[in-house]
Amino acid sequence: MASHAIVQSDVEFFWLSFIAYSAACLLYVVFLAVGRKKISFAATGLMGIGLVLQTMAIILRSVAAHHLPLTNMFEYISLFAWFAAILYFVSLKVYRMQIIGAFISPVIFMLMASASLLPKDMSIRLMPALHSYWLQIHVSVAALGESAFVVGFAANIMYFIKKALPQDSAFGNRMPDLKKLDLVSYKAVTVGYPLFTIGALFAGAIWAEQAWGTFWSWDPKEVGSLIVWLVYTAYLHARLVRGWVGTRAIVLSSIGFLCTLLTFFANLVLGGLHAYG
Amino acid sequence: MIKALKKAGEFFGSIRVAIILLIIITAVSFFGVIIPQELPQELYIHKWGSMAGRAMLTAGMDHVFSTFWFYLLLALFCCNILVCSSTRLWKNARNSVRKSFLPGKSSFGQFRHSMTLSSKKESRAAQEAVVAYLKKHLYSVKVQHGEAGVQIAARKGLLKDTGSLVFHISIVILLAGGLVGTRYGYSVVKQLNKGQVTAVPGRSFLVRCDWFKLERNDDGSIREYLSKLTVLSPEGSPVVDKIIAVNDPLTFQGIRFYQSSYGQDPEKASDVALRISGPALPGQGFDGTVPYDSVFRLPNTDITVLATGFIPDFIIDMETRQASSRSEEPNNPAVKVMLFRGKDTLYNHWAFFKFPEQHAENKAYKVIVDSYTPSYYTGIQIRRNPGEPVIWFGILCMTLGILAVFYISRRSLWILIESKPAGNSEITLGWTSSKAAGDSQKDFEKTGASLKEILR
């Protein structure tokens, strides 16, 4: 009964954090329209509250389940949103651009909304293949890498919007300049790419070797991750060696992010060895 | 001719070709995901129609990742990486380690980031102060005395370019490891019952399954499945044993044994719970579990029992009196129970788990079967992958390489210190960095400010 009570409260904290993130998202939209600094401060504050509440939810769930909550799509997507929120605050510390929140918070909102629709049952009993510490390493490092791609994508969206707006529009002036957005987008990829390579591809391959007896089996999710890696690899080469900056580079990295999203949900549609929940 | 070859090689090792190859491999992989792989050929024809289906099969779209043209594509990609590594990346790595001095003061004009400071210190003291500062900040420093003055070449983050070289070559290592594994390795799955021994392909030793166990959670879901394996020498003596589970294989002489699956043998049971009574049986009778297919002596008697011939879906041919199974489903499970005393058969009847009272007694004995434990076999994947050490090496190289490329930034600083007639000196700085322009400028300004401070 005691563990049941904790389960309840972890989902409650999830809903509370979802509400805080949604409110933050709403305030950011208002900020984009009105441009008052105070509103963006309030929105960032709400994001922070959401992050704290979600951290509570994750801790409670870990305690109740006796393992990190990484074992079904609800847990994975909320973790993804949690990392994205953390990376927003990291980028805030580095770039001091609260406005990035206006573009990350909708992504977090969408992630939390899709997580909220999924079954939230806790699996205390894992299937035998998941009995491995590689579960923690593989899933959390991959999710951290993918959340960095989310931050990059938020910068890409801002880039496209700023580019489409007429010069000297009040709205456009509220946004950072194109060069800076391009740089944020690139930086996010340089943070995400090594994490994704090590977490999704290598840790996954090592674990697969232990559990399934093969490093690589061309499972749909494996190929999906390979595609993500190939696209971002092309992006990095185009940028670093051939000097792609601006729109061309932003388009390529956005394709990378769309592949990430497709791969992220691929196991729900295509099945394969990653169809665990 | 040689010139043309050289030009072709240059083109082949170019980034342009690399990006084109990346795009093609991405597109092929994409098709490999949306077209289900390794299905029976008829299904492709059924789904995409005769024309398109046949075309797809001819192109090998049903097994994209093992077609010769996919291998060719990967081979081209490897060649591109190797050409690129042996030219551009090698040059970068070598140059980053070498410390070169600039030909003269005019060369400082070429830097995007440069500045000139003046110091009240004389040249010698200024040099010492600058070198001490740079060493403290982990730069590798080289000094040259020339006509124009003292030149200092300082660098930091030298491993970045080496990391990039290692990273690229490790892709080739990984693919080579994969190829060795597919070409020279094998993987077979064997279904073993308790006590069964199997040969290992390409090796003289044998492996025996001592037991298989399913562990369940309290809700009935499976928590773990385990097999105890014993490696036997060709003569049959045990060499090593281990209880293997999913995620915990046994490795012996380059062969790895994985717990890969399990299943139920429909024609067998592993034990039978039954009750034996009757006037001829002394005492209370027997109530307990007996092993399947092996003779068991009832306690405190001279009577032995044998439960054998398990049939999952019992049917009997009335003419021939031959019992057989209608299916593999346990719809009407039955087992033959026999009682013996010495050579005499005391009892010999089919017993039905769903109808325990049917045909259950003769004059002297009554046998009621209560339940049986299904017989599970274990699925052991036996694998040899001679590419494994190569793959581990590749993963290690690529991890180190990627960390070096992304988390080390290379900074090069050139400093010229000129003596001025008044006993003071003038210092010119030139700076390059692998960081993005804005960050590079910030770093340079910070370093410049520190140097200005110590040269005051």
Image (tube, coloured by chain):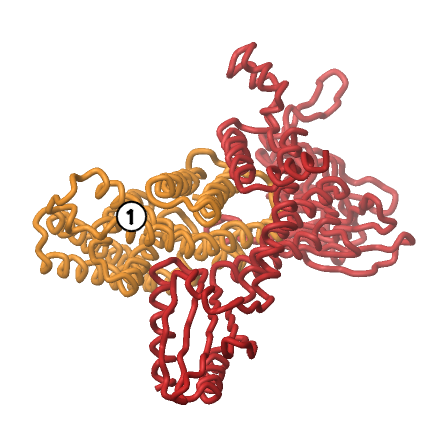
Chain colours: A orange, B red
**Which secondary structure, mark 1?**
helix
Looking at the image, residue B155 sits to the left or right of residue B361; the answer is left
Query: At which x and y percent is residue B233?
Result: 87, 55
Looking at the image, residue A60 sits to the left or right of residue B147; the answer is left
In the image, B124 versus A227, the foreground residue is: B124
Query: At which x and y percent is residue A120?
Result: 33, 49
The three-letter amino acid code for the residue at tag 1 is Ala
Which quarter of the figure is the C terminus of chain A placed in?
A: top left
Q: Residue furthest front?
A: B421
Question: Disc 1 marks which residue?
Answer: A154
- Is any part of residue B383 visible from this angle? yes
In the image, B133 versus A152, the foreground residue is: B133
Q: Residue furthest right?
A: B235
The chain carrying label 1 is A
Q: How many marks?
A: 1
The residue depicted at 71 percent of the width and 51 percent of the height is B257
Q: Relative to A43, is B454 above or below?
A: below
Looking at the image, residue B241 sits to the left or right of residue B138; the answer is right
